[in-house]
Image: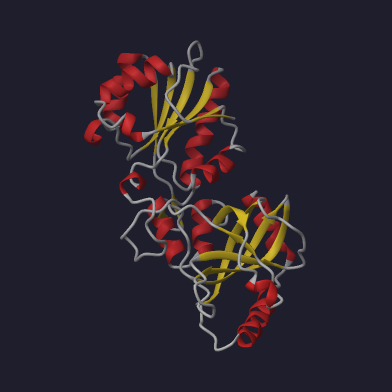
């Protein structure tokens, strides 16, 4: 999959089938649209293109230094960061992932966008959008206008209806709410995979190691949607292997000046993974963060937490099948 981050003429001479959207989460509704795109592109011998944005149009309005875990509705966070989105799409059979800076398009009228970008630059012959898709300056374009412009500029428009799961409309906003409520199994049904956080392992204070519970520490981008502070049952992928894990999100209140962090203790794992990228899949909430009177009390609680981490190997197999 070719990943492009800027305006480009690389498509000259190549006709394409294009799916347009924010695709935050790449949930089962998004994936249905993408499967229709790739099927159409294959049958028509077209280049399959995902046309999306980086940064997300809504995220661009939020400070990059906004703190995690604000009250729901007070900030916009990404279900998938751009690298996580690329990770999922790399296995979806897409030829090109094109990430535009929304600011470069914000002042284009709907027809300007269709004429100059879709028709001239991408040479699209098939366009796929969700039924609520809006485009152009002030979001004045809708699917009806896109179809009319498609007839004018020589491409077909496919409008994919919303999807429901267990009576719930599949949407990014619904998934954000479920993650905020720690309802990971419900979120998994809408996503088609466990909710995950991907990041590079950083050096920590090694407080866990001193307690006998060494951890891997990652620092997610500020825009990443994190579950609320607390302790979670997770599965963590490291160097192609999956491990049962216990993950803490928060400030480690037992220790002073710990800072906000995400750290996981991996069961039956040893080794140096500093600088490696790991993926942490969230399965179940165990408890809130607690400030203990001593490190001995904390260690005792961690041993109790760890006794609840050990679960059937089928869970690992399910995470591996749906998450990697």
Whether residue 21 can be seen here: yes
Question: Looking at the picture, does residue 261 appear above or below residue 295?
Answer: above
Residue 273, placed above or below residue 157: below
Quarter residue 69 falls in: bottom left
Determine the residue positioned at 42% across, 57% down: 176
Nearer to the camera, 95 or 187:
95
Instruction: From the top left corner, tell me how far across and down residue 285 is, in percent.
Output: 54, 72
Say whether residue 280 is left or right of residue 73: right
Q: Is residue 226 left or right of residue 280?
A: left
Q: Residue 261 location, x and y as percent?
A: 52, 65
Q: Is residue 140 visible?
A: no
Residue at (68% x, 81% y) in the render: 303
**Quadrant of the image containing the N terminus:** top right
The image quadrant that residue 242 belongs to is: bottom right
Depth check, front residue: 110 or 243: 243
Q: Is residue 111 above or below residue 90?
A: above
Residue at image position (32%, 40%) is: 132
């Amino acid at each position: 999959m070719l990943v492009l981050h800027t305006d480009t003429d690389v498509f000259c001479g190549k006709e394409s089938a294009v799916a347009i959207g924010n695709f935050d989460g790449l949930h089962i509704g998004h994936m249905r649209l993408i499967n229709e795109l790739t099927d159409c592109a294959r049958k028509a011998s077209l280049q399959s293109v995902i046309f999306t944005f980086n940064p997300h149009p809504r995220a661009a309005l939020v400070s990059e230094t906004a703190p995690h875990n604000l009250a729901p509705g007070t900030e916009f966070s990404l279900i998938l960061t751009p690298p996580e989105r690329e990770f999922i799409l790399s296995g979806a059979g897409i030829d090109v992932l094109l990430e535009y800076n929304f600011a470069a398009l914000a002042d284009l009228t709907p027809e300007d966008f269709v004429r100059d970008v879709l028709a001239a630059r991408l040479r699209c012959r098939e366009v796929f959008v969700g039924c609520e898709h809006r485009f152009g300056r002030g979001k004045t374009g809708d699917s009806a206008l896109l179809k009319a412009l498609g007839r004018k500029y020589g491409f077909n428009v496919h409008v994919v209806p919303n999807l429901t799961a267990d009576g719930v409309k599949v949407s990014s906003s619904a998934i954000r709410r479920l993650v905020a409520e720690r309802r990971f199994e419900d979120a998994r049904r809408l996503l088609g995979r466990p909710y995950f956080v991907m990041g590079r392992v950083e050096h920590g204070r090694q407080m866990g190691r001193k307690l006998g519970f060494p951890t891997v520490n990652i620092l997610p981008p500020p825009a990443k949607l994190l579950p609320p502070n607390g302790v979670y049952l997770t599965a963590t992928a490291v160097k192609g292997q999956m491990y049962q894990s216990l993950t803490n999100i928060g400030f480690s209140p037992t220790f002073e000046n710990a800072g906000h962090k995400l750290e996981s203790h991996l069961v039956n794992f040893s080794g140096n993974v500093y600088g490696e990228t790991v993926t942490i899949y969230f399965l179940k909430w165990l408890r809130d963060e607690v400030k203990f009177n001593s490190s001995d009390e904390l260690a005792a609680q961690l041993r109790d937490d760890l006794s609840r981490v050990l679960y059937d190997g089928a869970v690992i197999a399910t995470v591996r099948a749906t998450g990697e």
